[in-house]
Image (cartoon, helix red, strand yellow):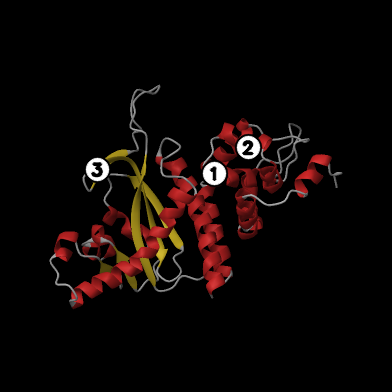
Amino acid sequence: MEQPTFADLEYDGKKRKTRRERFLERMDGLIPWGRLEDRIRPFYPKAGRGRRPYDLSVMLRIHCVQLFYNLSDPAMEDMLYEIESVRRFVGVRLSGPLPDETTILNFRHLLDTHDLGEGLFEEINRHLESRGLRLQEGTIVDASIIEAPSSTKNRAGARDPEMHQTKKGNEWYFGMKVHIGVDSQTGMVHSVCTTSANVHDVTQAHRLLHGGETQVWGDSGYQGVGRRQENSQRQVKWEIAMRPGKRRQLAQGSDETLVEKLKASVRAKVEHPFLYVKRHFGYSKVRYRGLAKNTQRLAVLLGFTNLIRAEHCMAAS
């Protein structure tokens, strides 16, 4: 055990904890570190004759902090040098070796290459199931646009070929869509996929179902989902919202109006994961070109969202 320095003692004696410290302590207690490390370990470099790799636990924690605050690789390296609470969360000291931006980049590429972002999402959900938060009998499906830069001022002189534009309301957007399936009881995300922004929501509904549903809720963008070939054999009740124009014609207080309000109250749970990803973790715009890297990042962020949501569910139960 290393001898604490005067700086360490001074830090320990400060009067209050910052919001960052409280958040990191909270996430430290929520994330199943052992499960996630076991999922990555088969792909992580082993110590040999060359330079010894950093501990897997250190690199995983650095990656998590990078996602918490939506940081670039250089910004993550700067944070390690500047902020003591982050170093303590990660498990490094200023007097020892600190990973540089290239090491951080290589670890992220390792996760992307082996689709480990989705793997970590699956491990988090297995952890939550082991804690009693199981899938029930209903799924809510929805999609949200993640914007991408439309500029062509780059080396290739072109926009990202995997991103496309779409119109929502009276506004045009360029980017990708993240599609999720959420448990209707707990609000936990159990399925995720991504597409270009111009892909219609209804075409991806079958990818968001776990197979045990008896009911599926969706907004008006999923009209006709039950008649599609990939869903024709499913024994589920489709609770799809009316189109806005038709709903406005309903009489106030009618049975149909009450049914639509009930559907909307159930569907509201699907908006919470998007709120966490876009506002809490700041991922309202893509950081990388192409769908693959962004998909891996979004999967882990949705896993973090499930952990935070599970904390509320377990506290209320």
| Residue 238 in view in this figure | no
Residue drawn at x 75%, y 40% as measured from the top left: 93
250 w.r.t. 113: above or below: below
Q: Position of residue 235 (x, y in %)?
A: 30, 73
Which numbered dot is residue 302?
Answer: none
What residue did someone put label 3 on?
171
| Nearer to me, 292 or 311 | 311
Q: Is residue 180 above or below residue 173?
A: below
Tell me the CA gap for discs 1 and 3.
28 Å
Q: Which mark is residue 69?
A: 1
Q: Earlier in the sequence, mark 1 or mark 3?
A: 1
**Amino acid type of the residue that numbered disc 2 sits on in the rendered structure:** Met
Labels 1 & 2 near each other (Cβ < 8 A): yes
Q: Is residue 120 left or right of residue 206?
A: right
Residues at discs 3 and 2 in contact (Cβ within 8 Å): no
Secondary structure beneath label 2:
helix
Please indicate whether residue 2 sits to the left or right of residue 215 in the image: right
